[in-house]
Amino acid sequence: MDRYEIVGGRRLEGKIRVQGAKNSVLPILAATVLTAGRCVIHNCPALSDTALTIRILRTLGCSAEWRQGSIFADSSVLSHLELSSVLTGKMRSSIVFLGPLLARCGRAKIAYPGGCRLGPRPIDLHLDGLRQMGAVVQEEEQHLLCHAPEGLQGARIVLSFPSVGATENLMMAAVLAKRKTTLMNCACEPEIVDLADFLTRCGAKIYGAGENTIEIEGVRALHGCEHTVIGDRIAAATYLAAAAITGGEIAVSGIEPENLMSMLAMLQKSGNEVFWEKNCCCLKAPPRLQALPQVRTMPYPGFPTDGLPLFLSLAAAAQGTSIFVENIFENRYSSVPCLQRMGASIRQEGKVAVVEGGSPLHGADVCAEDLRGGAGLVLAALAAQGISHIEGIEWIERGYEHFCENLTALGAGIWKK
Ligand code: EPZ
């Protein structure tokens, strides 16, 4: 298996255009199943998750091609309504094919989804919502067997937690359901708005995406469309953090300012100068990062759980004591043992981690266990004195397009070996 070799201590400097949002592309590709037509989706990152989603589309009988950052999908014909664990076992977001398949074809057989090991990844909110819309869902040992004998019906659904995936799944199920669906306590992430924009372009009637309540008027059919995906706010924050942790400066283009305000505020709190210039988000790092008094992860627009592992590494390199509280997933601290091996002083118990910055980080051999934890290890290695090796980079490359090349272009000493 490949690994990264990183020579730390080099200042990152330069300009980068951030990739399209992974967490938009995946549900939008699933949504193409709802349209019996051709869709062209631009600004799609070349990631293993994107390739796997294209494989899922082809398994269903759709055609799907990735060409220079655009995906050409045609779901006029759906010949197969079963997704095995070979396809769903690696990627949590495969579950969002369930709503579109039920809405378009009235039945689906999907193996349980896998993905990053962030703790239990239940799908009860997805299934309860679909049942309220008239779906019959049998939870068998290996897979979900679902059908909607009378077709999906509009319903009033209150989510007990603003789940991103459940909001996406139920919004997609509702666009072809009979009558109106009201989703309450929805996730408000920018990727939800992006998905709703795509569906609206296809003829769906969706009101309130990005707010706590979304209303969907069912329509008879959707047509294809052309859509450009928003920038990846977590990837953008990762590159900004890479400049911050190495005392550098960077300009990141291709990102919408309002989508990462909570992370920019945290970068400023740790002493970075952050400003917008010529459609770029720019950051100039201070000579020494300051500690982060309190980082609590919350549903959007709060500080995102995906950002926690990145800022954990920043805090390890900063001066002073930082406190983190993870409120979304049970296991967001997978990178802590490896950061400790690099010299970080971190006490973590349950959802709280206390980081005593100040002691310099040193290179070490470590292993990524999930996507954002792995990105956090790269950040720490970029700042550490000496050489680090990072195994498990397949986790990292699920979410970061050309990660090694981009960091190298910014002056990092990183090689894939
Ligand atoms: C999405 O995951 C993202 N993935 C995650 O990003 C992100 O961390 C997460 O939203 C939170 O923002 C994609 O969009 C592909 P959730 P998702 O449903 O939809 C509980 C990354 O690094 N829950 O909002 O799986 C769940 O256990 C990935 O790009 C239920 O209890 O997240 C968790 O505690 C990692 N029942 C909380 O809700 C359900 O039916 C948030 O989960 C569904 C979720």
Image (tube, grey):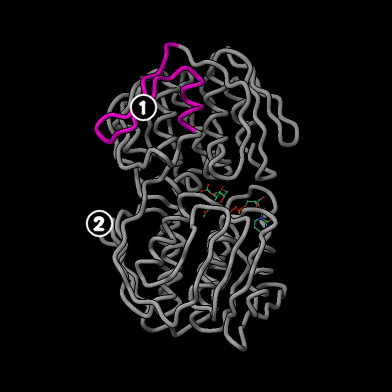
For the view shown, which residue lies furthest in the right direction? 349
- The residue sitting at 46% across, 49% down in the picture is 190
Q: Amino acid at mark 1?
A: Gly
* Residue 417 visible in rendering: no
Question: How many C-alpha atoms fall within 10 Å of the one at disc 1: few (<14), some, or many (≥20)?
Answer: many
As helix, strand or loop, the secondary structure at mark 2 comes to: loop
Q: Position of residue 90 (x, y in %)?
A: 55, 59
Taking 284 as reference, is 54 above or below it? Answer: below
Q: Earlier in the sequence, mark 2 or mark 1?
A: 2
Q: Position of residue 154 (x, y in %)?
A: 59, 76
Is 277 within the magenta?
A: yes
Q: Amino acid at mark 2?
A: Gln
Q: CA distance from mark 2 to mark 1?
A: 27 Å
Taking 263 as reference, is 356 above or below it? Answer: above
Left or right: where 139 falls relative to 365:
right
Left or right: where 351 falls relative to 35:
right
Question: Is the C terminus in the top left, top right, bottom left or bottom right quadrant?
Answer: top left
Q: Which residue in the protein does label 1 denote? A: 413
State the image quarter where residue 284 is shown: top left
Q: Which residue in the protein does label 2 denote? A: 68
Q: Nearer the viewer, residue 40 or 346?
A: 40
- The residue sitting at 63% across, 55% down in the picture is 185
Q: Position of residue 342 (x, y in %)?
A: 57, 23
Question: How many C-alpha atoms fall within 10 Å of the one at disc 2: few (<14), some, or many (≥20)?
Answer: few
Please give the label number shown on residue 284. none
> Which is in the foreground here, disc 2 or disc 1?
2
Q: Which residues are magenta?
A: 263-287
Q: Nearer the viewer, residue 20 or 294?
A: 294
Left or right: where 107 falls relative to 61:
right
Is 412 within the magenta?
A: no
